[in-house]
């Protein structure tokens, strides 16, 4: 399988599509999922082309995981969550829908259930969640 430079995350990276940006460094980019399964659900992606972990370089994986750890701490703080779920899918048979490496970071509370996939969130609600996460990042 090859990388498609016109996938939705590549378009977000190029500024062709909007997103609720949370964090960026030289190697990674983080934004809110517009169909969140939990409040604060965000996506960590590498800035360089990479389909998934099967073709990622060790440097891409290291950068993505370092940022994933930072975002896990931030969403837990922002949503006063005692836990976090990380999800990562590879190829269609593995559940991957967007073929640009990404890690889902979801703050979790005891006994909560994830929302079903595919439900768009209210943009104003997402904006509020983004502000909470950015504020938490500033404290980390």
Image (cartoon, rainbow, N blue to C red):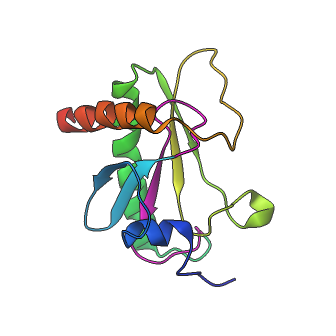
In terms of image quadrants, where is residue 99?
bottom right
Q: Main secondary structure of the magenta part?
A: loop
Considering every residue shown, the one lying at the far top of the view is: 111
x%, y% of residue 63?
A: 37, 62
Residue in front for this viewpoint, 63 or 75: 75
For residue 138, above or below residue 93: above
Q: Quadrant of the N terminus?
A: bottom right
For residue 65, above or below residue 38: below
x%, y% of residue 61?
A: 45, 65
x%, y% of residue 36?
A: 56, 39
Is 139 magenta? The answer is: no
For residue 64, above or below residue 35: below
Horizontal placement of 35 versus 139: left or right? right
Residue range corresponding to the magenta coloring: 34-53
In terms of image quadrants, where is residue 51?
bottom right
Is 35 magenta? The answer is: yes
Q: Residue at x 36, y 52 (%)?
A: 67
């Amino acid at each position: 399988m090859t990388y498609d430079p016109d996938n939705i995350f590549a378009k977000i990276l190029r500024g062709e599509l909007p997103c609720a940006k949370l964090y960026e460094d030289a190697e990674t980019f983080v934004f809110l999922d517009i169909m969140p399964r939990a409040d604060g659900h965000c996506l960590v992606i590498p800035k360089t082309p990479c389909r998934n972990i099967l073709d990622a370089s060790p440097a891409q994986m290291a950068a993505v995981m370092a940022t994933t750890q930072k975002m896990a701490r931030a969403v837990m703080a922002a949503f006063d969550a005692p836990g976090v779920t990380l999800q990562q899918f590879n190829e269609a048979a593995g559940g991957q829908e967007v073929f640009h490496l990404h890690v889902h970071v979801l703050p979790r509370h005891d006994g909560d259930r994830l929302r079903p996939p595919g439900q768009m969130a209210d943009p104003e609600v997402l904006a509020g969640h983004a502000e909470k996460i950015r504020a938490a990042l500033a404290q980390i």
